[in-house]
Amino acid sequence: MKRLFDLILTIPALLLLWPVLLVIALMVRIRLGSPVFFRQTRPGLHGAPFRIIKFRTMRDANGPDGTPLPDCDRLTPFGRFLRSTSLDELPELINVLRGEMSLVGPRPLLMQYLERYSPFQARRNEVRPGITGWAQVNGRNALSWTDKFSLDVWYVDHQSGILDLKILWLTIGSILKSNDICQPGHATMEEFMGNDNQDNQGV
């Protein structure tokens, strides 16, 4: 039923939003150059890898040693706007259409995090990752990793169609407020290094 729910909402959304996607793609090409899309391998259901698709929000910029500058230095005002409005996430509807993601679920993080999770945290991969989720409407990137993972696992244990509708509705309000886009001092969220420094329960 969840897959059917995703398709019922995603197919009309893509048909309605394709002009918006086209305009954003053109703006990204003009302001940031190519490639227009950011593609990266992320863990999906049960940790199976897939290629996430997002609009690019960062410029190419390297330091004197040739290594890329920190994210906060490469994130442009235009890219920050795309992130604050979540417009950069719209291409993920294609991932939903393919069955790699769901509209609602824990956000897909980085592949290297899989080996850093505790057994409790790894339960977030028992469902398809989502464009938005319970953690996103309860603090987003302002949350600690411990709180974020606890909210993700809570969703795994309580998922339902009613809850998904509630999360989608709350997501609209969160986008309009543009709150909790990043942690202080970070373009989005600091890297999760594991549980050695975690002092909360559920890790």
Image (cartoon, rainbow, N blue to C red):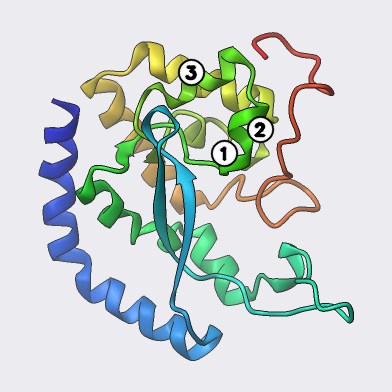
Dividing the picture into quadrants, the one containing residue 199 is top right
Residues under numbered marks 2 and 3 in contact, where contact means CB atoms less than 8 Å apart: no
Q: Position of residue 109 (x, y in %)?
A: 54, 41
Q: Which residue is mark 3?
A: 123
Which is more N-terminal, label 3 or label 1?
3
Q: Which residue is mark 2?
A: 143
Q: Which mark, by number, is residue 90? A: none
Identity, as a three-letter code, of the amino acid under mark 2: Leu
| Front residue (pair 160, 196) | 196
Residues under numbered marks 1 and 2 in contact, where contact means CB atoms less than 8 Å apart: yes
Q: Which residue is mark 1?
A: 140
| Front residue (pair 100, 77) | 100
Above or below for 29 versus 48: below
Q: Position of residue 93 (x, y in %)?
A: 28, 54
- Residue 19 lies left or right of residue 111; in this view the side is left
- Residue 2 lies left or right of residue 102; in this view the side is left
Judge depth for marks 2 and 3 and give the one in front.
3
Above or below for 16 versus 11: below
- Residue 146 lies left or right of residue 33; in this view the side is right
Residue found 26% across the figure and 47% down from its top = 96
Q: Furthest residue to the bottom?
A: 30
Identity, as a three-letter code, of the amino acid under mark 1: Arg
Identity, as a three-letter code, of the amino acid under mark 3: Arg
Q: Position of residue 197 (x, y in %)?
A: 84, 23
Q: Position of residue 196 (x, y in %)?
A: 82, 22
Q: Crowdedness of circle 1 by 10 Å Cα count: few (<14), some, many (20+)?
A: many
Q: Tell me the element at label 2.
A: loop
Judge depth for marks 1 and 3 and give the one in front.
3
- Residue 124 lies left or right of residue 165; in this view the side is right
Which is more N-terminal, label 3 or label 2?
3
Split into 4 quadrants, where in the image is the N terminus? Answer: top left
Residue found 40% across the figure and 27% down from its top = 46
